Image (cartoon, rainbow, N blue to C red):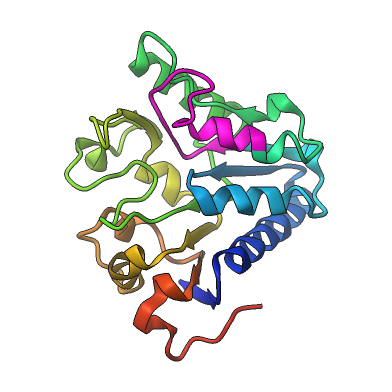
Amino acid sequence: MKIELFDDVDSVAQAAAEAIALSARRAVAARGKFILAVSGGRTPWVMLRALADREVSWNAVHVFQVDERVAPEGDPDRNLTHLRESLLQHAPLPPGQIHAMPVEAADLQAAATQYARALQEIAGSPPVLDLVHLGLGPDGHTASLVPGDPVLAVTDRDVALTGVYQGRRRMTLTYPMLNRARQVLWVVTGKDKTGALRRLRDGDRSIPAGRVQREEALLLADREAAGQLAAGHGQGG
């Protein structure tokens, strides 16, 4: 895992946007399309807004969700709401190439299977993401893979449902899907992440984030999140 530290949240978001744009250009050149999965959070919305200004072959981009809360369409809790606001209003991405998790469905198990099929249609069988963007919770969760949830043990499905976490069930990509990605991009900001970030750096598999593959991983963090890690790490460029 490569780690780059920055002075503030905006610098992290800008660097993340540049990393995604570079990955997109390489994927389109190699395979004719770029398949990205995005997590939620405040910094990622800044990242996506910055990405909209980058040189990207938007007609060749497909955006999937890493996870989503079970809530009505347009709900401010929905990652999709912010994803559309950040990208569709600023980048010429065809609206049909944002692939929303169908969390409004009456049968959520069938909806998870449907989303897995959508991934296969775009990303092959088994589906492989060019880049998956992940965040990190203070409790060490990533995506909606949270401590103690049975979803952590799912190995036979690429998309699954969680129990209730912070008041809502979630649909999430599982470890098999995340660990097939060609590249993992961690974006971590805020001083409440310091402990979890240290454990992620150390490969601590007792936290959910620690079980994501590290071979092709880039972690971008601000100095508040890095804490003592900041010593010895210069600002990335």
Where residue 140 appears, as percent x and y from the top left, is 28, 57
Q: Is residue 216 above or below residue 69?
A: below
Residue at image point 44% right, 83% down: 230
Residue 130 visible somewhere in the drawing: no
Residue at image point 79% right, 52% down: 53
Instruction: Name, please, the residue furthest toward the top.
Output: 106
Residue 133 visible somewhere in the drawing: yes
Residue at image point 66% right, 41% down: 86
Where residue 142 appears, as percent x and y from the top left, is 36, 50
Q: Is residue 43 above or below residue 72?
A: below
Quarter of the picture containing the N terminus is: bottom left
| Front residue of this view, candidates 107 and 29 | 107
* Magenta stretch contains residue 70: yes
Q: Which residues are magenta?
A: 64-85
Instruction: Name, please, the residue furthest toward the left.
Output: 148
Residue at image point 43% right, 42% down: 177
| Front residue of this view, candidates 117 and 227 | 227
Where residue 232 appears, as percent x and y from the top left, is 45, 91
Q: Is residue 146 above or below residue 9?
A: above
Left or right, residue 72 beside residue 151: right
* Magenta stretch contains residue 160: no
Image quadrant assignment for residue 150: top left
